[in-house]
Amino acid sequence: MKSIARRNFLKKTTQSLVVGSGIAALGSQAAEAATPQALPSFSHHVFFWLKDPEDKKAYEQLLAGLKGLGKIKQIKQAHIGKASINEFDKPVTDASYTFSVLLLFATKADEEAYLVHPLHKAFIEANKHLWSKVVVYDSIAL
């Protein structure tokens, strides 16, 4: 009798340990998944103001040009956006621009290579007549 009871106890304990370690493993995987990946170290954030914000053709041309920049291999991540206005905006929010593009690079050298890349130069030549203003903010991660 003692032998059967002991086997049942060991079987239940082993099952609990296996299930428990599986939960612990899932917990650590979830923690890893929840941990944000480190972003590339150099950001290039550019804001564009169209000369005529109501010109749909100019809007579409500039948007297509910005999307085309994504073919440049030095860009690790990109985000093209437009101004977001809602009732929660703060007095410090500038929503006067037409487009923003945030490009992330592994290094400043990659950003410098992007600046002289033929696709980037062609983008400027093909679209510079569309904008009235461009502002650039570059930063290096700490």
Image (tube, grey):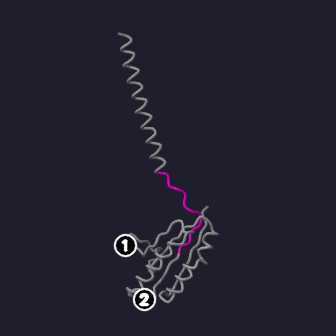
Q: Which residues are magenta?
A: 34-45
Q: Quadrant of residue 107?
A: bottom right
Q: Does 47 appear above or below 21?
A: below
Residue at the extreme top: 1
For the residues carrying marks 2 and 1, which lies nearer the camera in this image? 2
Q: Amino acid at mark 1?
A: Asn
Number of marks: 2
Residue 133 in the image: state x and y as whole percent.
Answer: 51, 85
Q: Is residue 129 left or right of residue 1?
A: right
The answer to which of marks 2 and 1 sits earlier in the sequence is 2
Q: Residue at x 53, y 70 (%)?
A: 103
Q: CB under 8 Å between callouts 2 and 1? A: no
Q: Amino acid at mark 2?
A: Asp
Residue assigned mark 1: 86
- The quarter of the rendered structure image containing the N terminus is top left
Q: Residue at x 42, y 76 (%)?
A: 83
- The quarter of the rendered structure image containing the C terminus is bottom right
Residue assigned mark 2: 52
Q: Residue at x 38, y 24 (%)?
A: 12
Classify 10 Å Cα crowding around label 2: few (below 14), some (14-19), many (20 and above): few
Residue at the extreme right: 109
Classify 10 Å Cα crowding around label 1: few (below 14), some (14-19), many (20 and above): few
Residue 123 in the image: state x and y as whole percent.
Answer: 52, 82
Asked if the stretch drawn in magenta spans residue 137, the answer is no
